[in-house]
Amino acid sequence: DGVDRRGSATSVDSTDETDLTEESRTCDGTSVKVLSEGYCEDDTSIMQAKEFDANVLAKLTTLEESHMLLRRTRAVSALASRLMGAPDEQACFEEVTKLLVPLFRVDRASYALLVDSEHFLVRNVTVNHRKHAIKMGFDAGDRGVVKPLKGTAVGSCAQTLKQHYTPRTKDSPFETHKLIYSMGINSVLATPILVDGNKFAGCIVVSLTIEDGFKVHDRILISDIAAMLGANIYSKRMKQAAEKSNKMSREMLHAMIPSKVIEKIECFWDESSEAYLHRHSCNSVGIFGSETNMDDSEHSRSFKKEKSKRDLREKIDFLNQMNREDSQCDNFGVVVDSSKKELGLTSQALYAENVDNVVILFTDIVGFSKMSLDMKPIEVVDMLQNLFCRFDNLCDKHGVQKLETIGDAYICTAGLFVDGNVNDAARNVLNLAKDMIRETRKVRLPRTETLSQDSFVSPQIRVGIHVGNVTCGVLGQRLPKFTVFGSAVNLAARMEQTSRPSRIHVTEDFHKLVSFEEDYEWDDCSETTVKNMGKFHSYLLKEVL
């Protein structure tokens, strides 16, 4: 049979009473574990099986009893697959009820589910006859009834984690049992439902109108049902928690990144997609070309050497281009032309795209740094939350996309991934800016040493707007962030920095888009000097009323 009998014989002969397992090998090297007869003596399932043999099987006296036990055992075994296939927790309860009532011929079945450390909820009450519906369904309710744990059989199960059987409710010390005795229930069996090991989640409560109606084998089988129910409840709850977490994550992602961008990058989170596999295979190469997967073969070393040279050339070109861009303008972020190379080889960006004719708005609070020194941190946060929530609503109203907030600065754009005319986008942003100034007047500054309780003083904002071409992208894999880069973004920021309190400062490019509108009145054209960018013609909108 291929077994090295000399090794196995030696192993078995040398086994003493304390060494219950030995390992030997066949001639082809396969490991074979040798178990002694005493190996499973302490196993819980083996012990329970022996108890079942002694307390149940040994006491069966008739063929009818044997047939009934076999039928119930097979039905309980089949329940496991039905519970696994149940879509949710409620479906699990229904599957168990469909088994308990007809198979065990119980008169009433319900579930007592833990609400908190002191209360449980009675739900899914089922009776076997219509005549019992009113009498025995007394605590069903539409959504269940909350009851205290203390002084109940359910409370006893919660403490001991064991079944509580009351063969005669008239002799029970619990007041609830005395109440149900008056309604015709004479025996009650409460079986704990345990999840995640030994954590109490509730009970299966079944009852009969006859006294001492639950045999030993019934109680054992119902314990098995409760164990299966607990395992599946835990599985369903974990699945529900994961789905809720995924939904929340997706909602947060949609809040941070435009939906049209998400459509383009969601493949990077799909483990079955080619984009995901390609990206994660590329991640083994660091930004400086260091390999995390070491292979000593000659082919691998040759491939690495060639790839290292190629990566080095690309990185030199990359750094040179960064220097050229940096010398041209003082960018918030470095703009790199991605049309001549693969993004995946260097930046590993999830997404990058050039977009033309984007309207960018910057706004911040005048004198915020000095103002916040006289305020408590929580007051600063509350004021900004009040103000920015108003701005969020205005963005929705005018069809403008919020980009981000940085301290007291609020940045938004129009014309990104939206089909429409740039003149319409400019008009929407300008109307938004006017409403922002009006809405800021409704926000009250917290009381400080210089502000009395009765005075109503509002912060003031200044606004800058420009229209131009930008490069947008999603950066980072943990908390990915959608952002825009380019000189157009810088110029919009400079317009805001050189604006006046409660005024809107725009570039000449933006002014051309809305100058023909009669609703807007402008001051005369002025010349604004922008650091590292030169001089630009700009306009101030007349004071917003």
Image: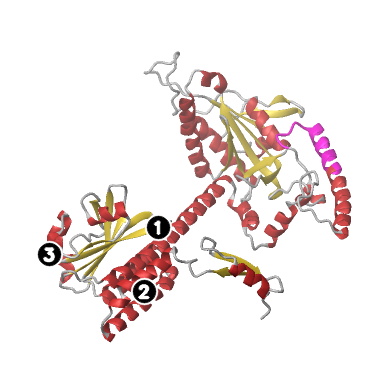
Q: Residue at x 25, y 72 (%)?
A: 215
Whether pointer 3 and pointer 2 mark residues with C-beta atoms closer than 8 Å, the reply is no
Where disc 1 sits, the SS reads strand
Left or right: 264, with 392 as reference point = right
Whether residue 97 is situated above or below residue 123 in the rendered picture: below
Q: What residue is at 66 percent from the left and 33 percent from the top?
A: 492
Whether the magenta-drawn stretch holds residue 440 is answered as no
Query: Which residue range is magenta in the image?
Result: 316-333
**Residue 110 visible in the snapshot:** yes
Give the labeled residue for mark 1: 195
N-terminal of the pair, mark 3 or mark 2, is: 2
Tell me the mark number nearer the camera, choosing from 3 and 2: 2
The image shows residue 401 at horizontal and vertical percentages of 57, 44
Q: What's the CA distance linking mark 1 and mark 3?
A: 32 Å
Q: Would you identify the image quadrant in which residue 123 lies?
A: bottom left
Q: Quadrant of the N terminus?
A: bottom right
N-terminal-most mark, 1 or 2: 2
**Residue at numbered disc 3:** 183
Residue wearing tag 2? 76
**Relative to 542, is 195 above or below?**
below
For the point 32% across and 69% down, the residue is 220
Magenta stretch holds residue 320: yes
Q: Amino acid at mark 3?
A: Met
Amino acid at the residue labelled 1: Val
What is the CA distance from the residue labelled 3 to the residue labelled 2?
Answer: 30 Å
Instruction: Identify which amino acid the numbered label 2 is placed on.
Output: Val
Instruction: Give above or below for 98 relative to 260.
Output: below
Q: Secondary structure at mark 3?
A: loop
Determine whether, in the image, residue 500 is placed left or right of residue 124.
Answer: right
Measured Cα–Cα span from mark 1 to mark 2: 19 Å
- x then y, percent, for residue 354: 72, 47
Question: Number of numbered discs present?
Answer: 3
